[in-house]
Image (cartoon, rainbow, N blue to C red):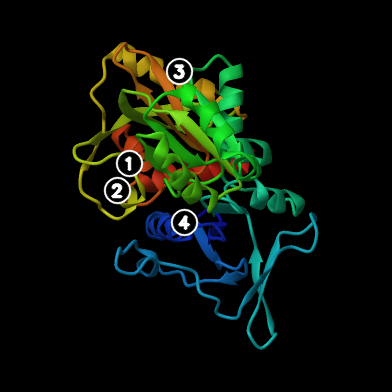
Amino acid sequence: MPEKITVVVLFGGRSSEHSISCATAGGVLEAIDRARFDVIPVGITRSGAFVLEEDSPAKFRLDPAALPEVVDNGSRILWPSSASSRALSVQDASGAVRALGDVDVVFPILHGPYGEDGTVQGLLELVSLPYVGSGVLASALGMDKHFTKTVLAAAGIDVAPWATVTAASWAASPSSVTASVSSLGLPLFVKPARAGSSVGVSKVTSLHELPAALEVALAEDSRVLIESAVVGREVECGVLGGRSGGAPRVSVAGEIVMTDRAFYDFEAKYLGGAGVELVCPAVLTDAELAEMQALAARAFTAIDGEGLARVDFFLTPSGSFVVNEINTMPGFTPISMFPACWIASGVSYPELIADLISQALEK
């Protein structure tokens, strides 16, 4: 029987998406094939402490009444002391150190700043630990909506018109900012440049609403994206990196159907909010699906993506696709679109996890 692979499942973190990361980890802990993988669950508290967590999927299930989180239990994870070692240890609250063994690969299931943005990827690069997902550059690009759009537009991929506003420019001259974005038309979406899960996002139907929307977004980030609303169907698909130098693989499409909601916000994504329906697979013609999959692969390649991503589109009434975002560590909870699209494509949740780990080891 082949030796099992030791996987660190890394989750939690300092961002406002802490609980979503925990819920994603709960799904992975429950689904990962224990016959093939030994798991070391490592949580990051909201203050940034790396702690040894319980290997308990139930503890991290998403419950709207009590969102899961990593609580500081006094332990501290000690990463390898150099790139020549893969030995992981833990120090308990009394100061005693215990070896956890050698690590084969890290699965950083982190959303938002200080995890999805290249920072943790840089830490793992420093100690030469293989990890699932994109590297430092692609993670940073995918996290920053302004630079994602800049790179995709340079690659000839359609994105919604936008303007980027800093906290300093808004404080210096609100009237100038308002005048500069008025050409984008209405309605507008106001988003933190470096946040996910629709945290801090507002829909603006009048420029009088802009100050309040900017206040919400600037609470999450010092840079804010203001973009034109695009009329069209909201469709998205999952991307997996190619194997052995092959092309990226793209799933079937899913669709977010808004029945009675202004937009697909945090409550609708994760807390079972009413007024939205997730349809997978989406009803598209063969030609539409092929075009969407090709664009998703191009977007993934444009940012130098690795491992996985979810690419979100608008399909306009004229039949053209506009990329909304690319997420290098998409939601992985049981109700998330990324695993749903792959399950509809014939790849089970456990197979998806195993594929991502195999990619990381191959890389």
Reply above or below: 230 against 19: above
Reply above or below: 199 against 71: above
The image position of residue 337, as x and y in percent, is 34, 40
Q: Residues within 10 Å of mark 3 (few under 14, many from 20)?
A: some
| Label whose residue precedes the other's in the sequence (2 or 4) | 4
Q: Secondary structure at mark 2?
A: helix
The answer to whether the residues at label 2 and label 1 have Cβ atoms under 8 Å apart is yes
Q: Identity of the amino acid at label 2?
A: Ala
Q: Nearer the viewer, mark 2 or mark 4?
A: 2
**On the picture, is 193 further left or further right than 334?**
right
| Label whose residue precedes the other's in the sequence (3 or 1) | 1
Q: Nearer the viewer, mark 1 or mark 4?
A: 1
Q: Residues within 10 Å of mark 4 (few under 14, many from 20)?
A: many
Q: Identity of the amino acid at label 1?
A: Tyr
Disc sitting over residue 268 in the figure: 2
Disc 3/disc 1 C-alpha distance (Å): 25 Å
Which quadrant holds residue 347? top left
Q: Identity of the amino acid at label 4?
A: Ser
| Label whose residue precedes the other's in the sequence (1 or 4) | 4
The answer to whether the residues at label 3 and label 4 have Cβ atoms under 8 Å apart is no
Disc sitting over residue 294 in the figure: 3
User: Badge 1 is on which residue?
Assistant: 264
**On the picture, is 265 further left or further right than 49?**
left
User: Badge 4 is on which residue?
Assistant: 21
Q: Residue at x 61, y 78 (%)?
A: 75
| Label whose residue precedes the other's in the sequence (3 or 4) | 4
Q: Residue at x 69, y 52 (%)?
A: 124
Foreground residue among 90 and 285: 285
Disc sitting over residue 52 in the figure: none
The image position of residue 244, as x and y in percent, is 59, 29
Disc 3/disc 4 C-alpha distance (Å): 29 Å
